[in-house]
Image (spheres, grey):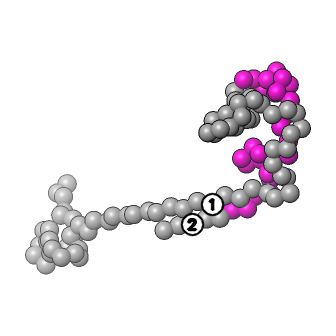
Amino acid sequence: MEFGFRKIFTDYLDDVSTSYPDYNELLLTNGPIAVQLSYRGDELPGGDPAFPTKDTQRGGSAQKDIYYFTGLTITFRPSFGGGGSRNRSFGKKGKYGCPAVPL
């Protein structure tokens, strides 16, 4: 099991910092997808569909972003020949390992 916690030294990991840009300027310089991703308040129940005016506070730049992750790894390593509950012998009786291949 693995758990990681990272504090980064920027406030732009989630693209939420300082204030909103001007809608028209963002549209002209970066295109419609940038505008859609810049404000997503219309996706919330009861959210405002109107893009906020320029310089409306969007977030605070005093606190930097953090993120965490978790992971679980399960590894299965089958036992061929040596060990386990079954004793398998290859070749001579009593020896474990892969059978010899004639050349």
Q: CA distance from mark 1 to mark 2?
A: 7 Å
Mark 2 lies on residue: 3
> Which stretch is magenta?
6-32
Above-or-below relation of 21 to 92: above
Q: Position of residue 35 (x, y in %)?
A: 74, 29
Above-or-below relation of 27 to 52: above
**Residue at 15 percent of width and 75 percent of height:** 87
* Res 56 → quadrant: top right
Q: Are marks 1 and 2 in contact (CB under 8 Å)?
A: yes
Mark number, residue 76 = none
Neighbour tally class for label 2: few under 14, some 14-19, many 20 plus, Cα within 10 Å: few
Above-or-below relation of 75 to 27: below
Say left or right for 17 vs 102.
right
Q: In front here: 89 or 60?
A: 60
Above-or-below relation of 20 to 7: above
Q: Quadrant of the C terminus?
A: bottom left
User: Is residue 27 in view?
Assistant: yes
Q: Position of residue 23 (x, y in %)?
A: 82, 27
Q: Amino acid at mark 2?
A: Phe
Q: Position of residue 24 (x, y in %)?
A: 84, 23
Q: Amino acid at mark 1?
A: Tyr
User: Circle 1 — which element?
Assistant: strand
**Residue at 17 percent of width and 57 percent of height:** 102
**Residue at 81 percent of width and 34 percent of height:** 52
Q: Is residue 10 magenta?
A: yes
Say left or right for 49 vs 10.
left
Q: Is residue 84 magenta?
A: no
Mark number, residue 68 = 1
Q: In front here: 48 or 4?
A: 48
